[in-house]
Amino acid sequence: MTKLKQHRLLLPIAIFLLFILNIIQASKTELLPDEAYYWVYSQYMDWGFFDHPPLVAVWVTISDFFCKDELGVRFFSTISFSLLIYLLWNTLEHPRKKDFTWLFLLLLFSTALLNAYGFITTPDTPLLLFFALFLFAYKKYLTKKNTLSYLLLSLAITGMMYSKYQGILIILFVVLSNWKLVKDYKLWLVILGSLILYIPHLYWQYTHNFPSIYYHLYERASVASYKFEYTLMHLVNAIAILGFTSIVIFKAFFKGIKTNNLFHKGLNYIIIGFFLFFLAASFRGHVQAQWIAPIMFPLIFITFNYLIENTKQLKLFNYLAIVNIIIILIIRIIIANEEIIPVKLKFQGSKEWTTKAKNLTKNTDKVFINSFQNTAIYWFYTREKPHYQRNFLGRKNQFEFIPGNNKFSADSVSYFTRIFKDYSEIKIKASGKDSIFISFIDDYKSLFKITIDFVYSGELTFSTSPNESINVVVKNPYNFDIELHDLYIEIVFQNKKGNEIYSIPAKVSSSKIEALSKKNISLYFDAARIHEIKEYPNVGIGIKTSKKMDLVKVSSLHNYNIANQL
């Protein structure tokens, strides 16, 4: 056993076997909804996308060149994961390193979340590869400041920033750990070179009005009130991404928190920085487990060196790691084989429901409401391009930029929703516990780029009149006239959490808005129906082109008050 643990071919053989396992897993496991969404990115390659930089789409495009179906999304991820293992191994430095190849592999194979990135494709997949390269390059830089180390740093920084915006946090925390870096003018050239390479993405953001920045900093994170569960789940996630071995791993981290070694210090700053940054973020909204995924590599490095010198802790770690690996293997088997357990997981059953939906909605255009993941899943598995439309409560996403999505009409459309509506005609069991509801709309018109906003930009004041009027400005971006009486226009009141609405129908003072023009009109509605002002403090305007569909937001939101309650 000792000879096997120290065999010089142990690492390459283990990586190769893991690569084969990941290939099988990737081909047998249905796509996660987000993976299908990133596949949609790859259908219209660009220098940027609504939610993320473009490298995840590059991963998908490369995979699609070599393979089809699920493997056509994930193939290159299995390769990049194998590469990052080699990078991590070559970054490690310890006099007895080669005697503990088995420990390095045990750390990798038992780290719960890390295993997923061997067979799925998300923005974290390329981020982790370039993060591994960054750590390798930074270690080389600290040892010898040569041309290669500077070039590798520039490549790694550029790759991280093209993968996910969190890459900038890694750079920031490393600089904070070693202020002398700012005195090295060559590093400023590295940053300059990375910025030059990043210009295409920055230009994309500029030409699209910086959608990613606005979404991540304002729309995604903002919540009306703090929930303790957000912070609690962040703490739980920090443990869950590691599994049972977190007991030993965090002990190793705290034991080495005081260090003069610059590389180790940088690792500590990354761990602490990510944890505190997203701890603060939890006061604004839900924090997802994968957002702190980069702390896994520093923790693996620190724990590896710690366990070599602490044999008592090594025995405990071995037991816990075996438990982790057994659980991970069971989970991998379950997610690749739907029939093993009676209940379908959240991402299982996509092939089944999309095939059924396709057969039940032949000869119609498909319009999905407020679920870009379901839209993407349907598109991937049926290869029929659907349309996506967000309702009043929906968030913006990449479908906003897909050609033909926002402007089309059809004699008949199948209208897909995630919740039952009065007009729903068909129910299909979807992934996990979810269902899909379908109705049919004749003579469908998509006119949702029109805007109808309040003339007054401040807090609005309403009376309790049953014939209240309010001045609005209507903008028609289309190259054809729009009959306003063909639209169902409603005054919409939204609650504090932003997840519920009620609405009051409105009548218009004008019948038509000409092509490519704007016009001031009045809306009339029954203000006596306004209620629960404190619970529903925001007001906006929504429209629909058929009674059998959801309202779509066409205005900004405003606060309001009632005149006789001032």
Image (cartoon, rainbow, N blue to C red):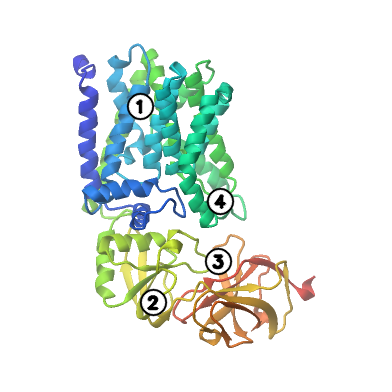
Above or below for 328 versus 404? above
| Disc marking residue 500 | 3
Distance of label 4 from label 1 (alpha carbons): 33 Å
Query: Which of pointers 1 and 2 lies earlier in the amino acid sequence?
Result: 1
Distance of label 3 from label 4 (alpha carbons): 18 Å
Q: Is residue 508 left or right of residue 1?
A: right
Please give the name of the residue rendered at 51% of the width and 86% of the height, measured from the top-left corner.
Answer: 486
Number of residues whose C-alpha sits closer than 10 Å to that of mark 4, classed few (under 14), some (14–19) or many (20 or more): some
Q: Position of residue 499 (x, y in %)?
A: 54, 63
Disc 4 target residue = 221
Number of residues whose C-alpha sits closer than 10 Å to that of mark 3, classed few (under 14), some (14–19) or many (20 or more): few
Q: Nearer the viewer, mark 2 or mark 4?
A: 4
Q: Is residue 140 left or right of residue 281?
A: left
Query: Which of pointers 1 and 3 lies earlier in the amino acid sequence?
Result: 1
Q: Disc 3 marks which amino acid?
A: Glu
Disc 1 target residue = 88
Query: Which of pointers 2 and 4 lies earlier in the amino acid sequence?
Result: 4
Number of residues whose C-alpha sits closer than 10 Å to that of mark 1, classed few (under 14), some (14–19) or many (20 or more): many
Q: Disc 1 marks which amino acid?
A: Leu
Distance of label 1 from label 3 (alpha carbons): 47 Å
Q: Secondary structure at mark 3?
A: loop
Q: Disc 4 marks which amino acid?
A: Ala
